[in-house]
Amino acid sequence: MHDIRYDEVHDEFFVVNPFAEAVLAFRAESSGQESPVRIIQGPHVKIGGTRLAVDPVHNEIFVPDATRIRVYPRDANGDVAPIRIIEGPETQLARAESVAVDPVNNILVVGFNKVGDEPDGAIFMFNRTDNGNVKPRAVIRGPKSEIIRINQMAVYPPKKLIVAAMPGIEEMMEPPTAFLGVWTYDDNGEVPPKWKIPIGPKTTLKKPFGVVLNPKNKEVIISDMRLNAVLTFSVPEIF
Amino acid sequence: MINRRRKEIGLLTAVCAGLVLFLSHAGSEVSALVLQTSNGIRKPIAIERAPQRVIKDQYPSFSAVAVDADSNMLVVTDENLFQILEYDRRENTPPQARLSEPKRIISGPNTRAEMMCGAYIDPVTKEIYVVNNDTQNWLPVFSRDARGNVAPSRYLAAPHGTFGIAVNEESQQMFLTVQHQNSIVVYRKQASGDEKPLRTIQGSETQLEDPHGITLDLKNKLIYVSNFGNAQVLPPGSRGGRRAPEGYGKFDPPSITVYPLDASGNVKPLWTIEGPHTMMNWPSHIVLHEARQELFVANDADDSILVFRATDKGDVAPIRMIKGPNTGIKNPPGIALDVKNSEISVVSMGTHSVLIFPVTANGDVKPSRVVRGGPSNQVALNIGNPGAVGYDSKRDQILVPN
């Protein structure tokens, strides 16, 4: 599994099973081999990605699939077609790997992957309610952005922040270019991150894969693939 | 419905409160931003500090095992610290010992070995083959003397998501399962670099559904494959593949599918073992005992080892099962057969250990020997390739998918 999202409103968490092309919703207190409470799967679903974002306010699930973002009802169960799809040449979507949604400021953030000789990754911003062949409202990419590829992302609506795990070049086990980056919704173009938590001996990070925020304690929680560990950083300055 | 509505309103209220808080601090925040952008180019502020807390298992998560009885090699792969460890086959960690020290360790960025899930020992050269799964697309091979952060003697660019490995020493062919493509790929055993497979078994008819373990019956010319059951439904004749647009997902029961040794293309299995009586639950590595005509299955999610007759078909119960608190088996992805000494070696990922049983073991029996990579009372965290992280704000819990 390459993503997990907790929904505080409905006390559930969501994951994608990419091998069975399914979105699974579990009770938050699930334990052991408990079955999911809902499964979105079938010929009309077409889950092509491995990550997702959940909007508990507007009851929607977003799943990226390289060239498109599919949107499903949060409470969908069974063979349910997406209610919206963002796709088409105007969207510039390519290698869309991860998403994060802000239900307050109505922003959908999309992170791009990079494999081999593909172009470097990027952060795209859309309106939360976008549908069809729409232009992104902002794109962050280019050498100065330091973005190579993006795994999991989080957003912080009160300060309009995008927090992205950057594991660096995929083919390298310990890429020197990995870090955790923080941008704002106002960023557009070749913009460096506002803050970064770098890899290295001080942070002990090697390859950040996942990120989630705990605003109550002003903490950034990072999963690191190369360490097979979860590290919690106190970062009050970004909250 | 009313409760749900109340919860939604509650969240909106909380979010609005956050916005008010944000606006009250907006002045100082904007000033900071202006300072950073005064020369027109933002300079990132590096937050270089130690983490407050770290959740990490300091001991190996054993994932696959290979045994060479002639040279007394017991080779184990470790998905946590990314190591290949060689122990003496006869090793038995004393109960009071913290752990057994391996004879050698191969590990480091030069090895091209990371999230390893399969292992094989060449019976002649004693070279070690390891299969990477989701993080590196290499199959590196190491010499008998390799140790430390060494480059492999050779490596093959393997498909993304390979899991199982079996070798036909007669034909010098290497068989790999590929989770992400629902396929079996067959290479020359000595293949390296970007060499292409000799043949592939893949497609709508194969019933390959998230394939993991693979073993060969050279006497009866058969391939056995274990499948988790994460299926891709494809139109007839489709070759499928990762994210095939013509397919869609489905959950099927776990299974073992059987093919002719020389199968190629979109072929149907000769027969399958599948159904509730089989008790399969994440059947991972499998191994066939040719002389006994028995199939051993590392049944990961059931904390058990299942034994079937090689000719079993359909919804059959295993003829033997090793399971229970005395066995020490917890999440066993790997298994290896030692025909010479009539033993099986079982990787117990949940207890940092390798457990050795007689091939005839049955029920809740203690292992003959235990090789521990960590203290016996230490809980294995089983964090492997944590591609994401979640936070349950209600329970103040961190959720880690693997």
Image: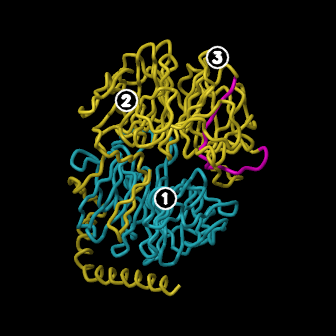
Chain colours: A cyan, B yellow
Residue A27 is marked as: none
Q: Quadrant of residue A145?
A: bottom left
What residue is disc 3 on?
A: B171
Residue B110 is marked as: 2
> Dot 2: few (<14), some (14–19), or many (≥20) neighbours within 10 Å?
some
Could you tell me which residue is drawn at 47 percent across and 43 percent down?
Answer: B303
Q: Is residue B378 left or right of residue A189?
A: left
Indicate whether B95 appears above or below B179. Answer: above
- The residue type indicated by label 1 comes to Ser
- The residue type indicated by label 3 comes to Ser
Q: Secondary structure at mark 3?
A: loop
Could you tell me which residue is drawn at 49 percent across and 85 percent down?
Answer: B5
Q: Nearer the viewer, residue B379 or B208?
A: B379
Indicate whether A101 appears above or below A57. Answer: above
Indicate whether A238 appears above or below B268. Answer: below
What residue is disc 1 on?
A: A98
Residue B16 spot, x, y in % from top left = 37, 83
Chain under numbered label 2:
B
**N-term mark: 2 or 3:** 2
> Dot 3: few (<14), some (14–19), or many (≥20) neighbours within 10 Å?
few
Q: Do the residues under discs 1 and 3 have CB atoms within 8 angstroms?
A: no
Q: Quadrant of residue A239?
A: bottom left
Mark 2 vs mark 3, foreground winner is: 3
Mark 1 to mark 3: distance in Å?
44 Å
